[in-house]
Amino acid sequence: QVQLVESGGGLVQPGGSLRVSCAPSGIIFSIRGWGWYRQALGKQRELVAAVASDGRMAYTDSVKGRFTISRDNAKNTVYLQMNNLLPEDTAVYYCNLAYTSSRIPWGQGTQVTVSS
């Protein structure tokens, strides 16, 4: 059974940094593209960053220059380093497949709250 477990969220002040992690299990990690998605209260879930199996990365405009997605195939883990966080980055962050129309059942996500 495939499972997605996100971790690393928390409360941070504006301008601060956080790194969230996701370690999918029950699936061959290295051959797939992975993405970080977020859903703010009352809004639709959106893709914010993706990393392809060959290492290509893509970002939504609102996080370019602030967020960095990375993957460690040896650890079956995908990361999202978030710097210069803004209040509008407050959301639940999820990982899932990217560069494909397929999705794994969503995990619980990890809450990121940016507030002073």
Image (cartoon, rainbow, N blue to C red):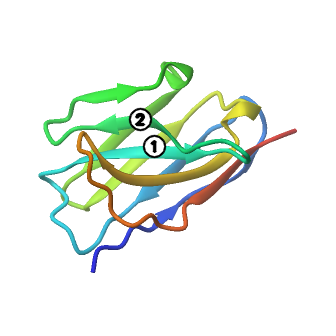
**Quadrant for the C terminus in the image:** top right
The image's mark for residue 49 is: 2
Residue 35: percent from left, percent from top: 36, 44
Which is nearer the eye, 35 or 77? 35
From the viewer's perspective, tell me whether residue 56 is left or right of residue 69. Answer: left
**Quadrant for the N terminus in the image:** bottom left
Q: Are marks 1 and 2 in contact (CB under 8 Å)?
A: yes
The image's mark for residue 62 is: none
Q: Which residue is mark 1?
A: 80
Callout 1, which amino acid? Leu
Task: Point out the residue furthest to the bottom here.
Answer: 1
At x 72%, y 32%, the residue is: 88
- Nearest to N terminus: mark 1 or mark 2: 2
Instruction: Select label 1 or label 2 by which is in front.
Output: 2
Dot 1, crowdedness within 10 Å: few (<14), some or many (≥20)? Answer: many
From the viewer's perspective, tell me whether residue 81 is left or right of residue 31. Answer: right
At x 46%, y 25%, the residue is: 60
From the viewer's perspective, tell me whether residue 23 is left or right of residue 56. Answer: right
Which is nearer the eye, 46 or 3? 46
7 relative to 68, above or below: below
